[in-house]
Image (tube, helix red, strand yellow):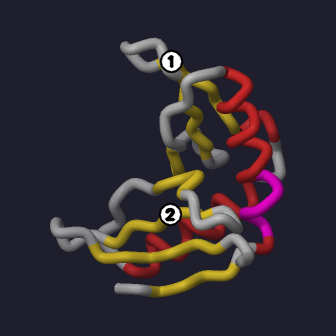
Amino acid sequence: MASKFVITKGKDGKDYFVLKAGNGEIILQSQGYKSASGCENGIESVRTNSKDSSKFETREAKDGRTYFVIKANNGQEIGRSQMYKTTSGCANGQESVAKNAPDAAVSDER
């Protein structure tokens, strides 16, 4: 299975997307968007910004696990990863987004 963006409607009525790797694992999730076009623009922003390693920011959670965010040119967070037990796992996650996002298909499941 190839990687893909999956768009869903949240219980709050907002649109969300996730990026799933070829194995089906979620490697990035979005914030909530008030409009379908905003969500689609978020996906395009991830496609564009994932090509630039400086757009990724590694962070540490209170429990010591790491995660990363990807930011748009305006500095706004457009996606957040799962939590990783190791920094090397987090780095691998970033590499996976950079590799998979640009050409990932979109599945609209709203």
Tell me where residue 67 appears, x and y as whole percent: 54, 31
Tell me where residue 61 appears, x and y as whole percent: 43, 20
State which quadrant residue 110 falls in.
bottom left
Question: Where the N terminus falls, by quadrant?
Answer: bottom right
Write the residue at 66% across / 62% down: 21
Write the residue at 75% across / 50% down: 96
Tell me where residue 78 appears, x and y as whole percent: 52, 51
State which quadrant residue 56 falls in.
top right
Query: Mainly helix, strand or loop, the magenta region?
Result: helix
Rendered position, 57 above or below 36: above
Q: Which residues are magenta?
A: 98-102
Name the secondary structure under disc 2: strand
Q: Residues within 10 Å of mark 2 (few under 14, many from 20)?
A: many
Q: In the image, which disc is placed on residue 18? A: 2
Q: Is residue 100 magenta?
A: yes
- Of 63 and 15, nearer the camera is 63
Rendered position, 30 above or below 93: below
Q: Amino acid at mark 2?
A: Val
On the picture, is 39 further left or further right than 102? Answer: left
Name the secondary structure under disc 1: strand
